[in-house]
Amino acid sequence: MNMENKSIESLHEDHHEWLQEVTNWHNELIYYSRVLLRLVDGIKLGPDTEKMEEFQSRFDSMQEEFDRMAKNITAHDKSLADTQSDHKLQQHQDMDKQIRAFKTKFNELKNEFYKFEEKFIYE
């Protein structure tokens, strides 16, 4: 459906889906953080420790982005009734791009982590 033809109800549905995705990503990240903590407990200090600290830092940054995205989505959803049609559609398109870009970034992080973690699982 063309963005210009989307109804307010449809925009609300998008927001609901986005919030669901953000919640799922948040839960995945909690899981990866726990896996990382277990890996840290099981290794000796060395190059892997530095990489694990880097992952934890990136996980923390992602978590902050999740929180920011959820707040932005909720604020945009509440503002739908208050703003002009053209403005809210542009905001919606911008938010859609942000969600897609974030999804790509998060998937890249997960893939990097899987590759890193794999060497500990199959040792």
Image (cartoon, grey):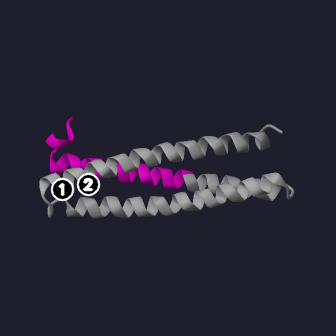
Magenta stretch, residue numbers: 1-28
Residue, disc 1: 87
Give the structural element (helix, strand or loop) at label 2: helix
Query: Are the residues tagged 2 and 1 within 8 Å (C-beta)?
Result: yes
3, above or below 15, in the image = above
**Could you tell me the amino acid type at mark 2?**
Gln
**Could you tell me the amino acid type at mark 1?**
His
Residue, disc 2: 91
Tell me residue 92's x, y (percent). 26, 51
Residue at image position (19%, 59%) is 80
Q: Residue 4: name its quadrant.
A: top left
Drawn side of residue 95 relative to residue 83, left or right: right
Magenta region includes residue 65: no
Magenta region includes residue 27: yes
* Callout count: 2
Residue at image position (59%, 44%) is 110
